[in-house]
Amino acid sequence: MAHITLVLPFALPLPEFAPDLVRALQAPALAALLSRTSSARRAPGADAAHALPHETWLARQLGLADDGPTPFAGAAMRGFGFEPGPGRWHIVTPAHIQIARSHLMMADARQVSLDDEDGRALFEAARVLCEETGHALRYGDAHTWFLRADDWTGFDTASPDTVANMDLTDFMPKGARAQAFRRLQNEVQMAWHAHPVNAAREARRLPVVNAFWVWGASVQGQPPSTKMTTYTYAVPGWLAALGQQRLASLDDLDGVLAQGGLLVAGNLGQAALAADWSDWLQGMQHLEDALFAPLLAALKDGRVRELRLVLSSREALADYTTSALAQRKFWRRPTLDSLI
């Protein structure tokens, strides 16, 4: 029988909205999974300044011990078919930065929506500038590039989801080593300012790509060491690259149910980061129908022996384990109060 770990980034709503959202959510299968458990734990995030709770949890779970809070670069490179070799590699995320009333703010990368043709065109313009300053740049997908900068040490940059829609002042790299990053950032920004891709995007009223965000540094990054098969669904490209199998939809869970492993379902991210709770409810309802209900049925009929659910928000992480035996605790009334 399979053991499954299900990771649900942003499945915990913000506390001020949680009571109303729980009342509106119709998810009896999720309620049973969260209420009839053999263990339950909830804790604040370990490093809210640089990574979200589910990101640090995944780094530990995948055995990516390194010198930063989100050392995903080397492992993600391997997922895209590159061998990092020696050196300090960083993930590069093309970004849209806008001026708010009193600060700079970076939009959620999901809203930038770059296709491969535009991504490669912007990448080529940046690659020339990077190589002129002695930095190799590699292309993973339109939203995921990799930069080698061995001397960019002594500062940690936060993950894109950590900084999305936040005041960038709190997250900009500081110190002498960060000056090189800022110089390169400025040069790339100038090259992209009049780039045909951005001119076309502006004409279509799409966010222009006017900056890049560097993060996820690793040195001699090792591949994920977990023995579990890792599946991903609706996650950013860097995270999909860490898994063995990418699920285009949740319509066919037969492989997950038969083999078990770790499944990361990331379809709630855009709605949660935008505080669009109507879309968040729709996303949770989709998970209820396509994921929670089938998993509950598989537990009850013995196809799944144990299910671990890891839910997160910006501030907290909740960890629940249930099993076929735990689901027999009929005296525990199914409730979604755990989400509050």
Image (tube, rainbow, N blue to C red):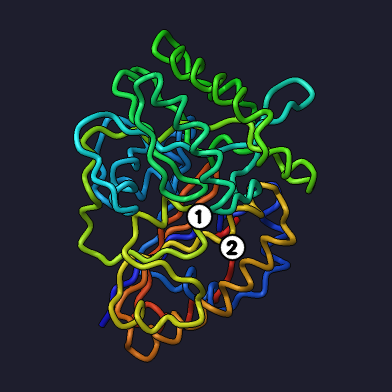
Q: Where is residue 317? Give x, y as percent.
A: 46, 49
* Residue 121 quadrant: top right
Q: Residues within 10 Å of mark 1 (few under 14, many from 20)?
A: many
Frontmost of labels 1 and 2 is: 1
Q: Residue at x 34, y 53 (%)?
A: 80
Identify the residue at the far top of this view. 176
Residue 99 in view: yes
Q: Is residue 183 left or right of residue 69?
A: right
Q: Is residue 258 left or right of residue 314?
A: left
Q: Where is residue 89? Give x, y as percent.
A: 32, 33
Amino acid, disc 1:
Pro
Q: Residues within 10 Å of mark 2 (few under 14, many from 20)?
A: few
* Residue 302 quadrant: bottom left
Q: Is residue 312 above or below residue 197?
A: below
The dot on residue 9 is 1
Q: Where is residue 99? Give x, y as percent.
A: 74, 26
- Determine whether the residue tagged by mark 2 lies in a helix, strand or loop: helix
The dot on residue 99 is none
Q: Where is residue 26? Give x, y as percent.
A: 67, 75
How far separated are the C-alphas under marks 1 and 2?
18 Å
Q: Residue at x 61, y 67 (%)?
A: 284
Q: Which residue is mark 2?
A: 337
Q: Is residue 324 above or below residue 223?
A: below
* Residue 308 quadrant: bottom left
* 297 and 222: which is toward the camera: 222
Mark earlier in primary sequence (1, 2): 1
Q: Residue at x 62, y 22 (%)?
A: 190
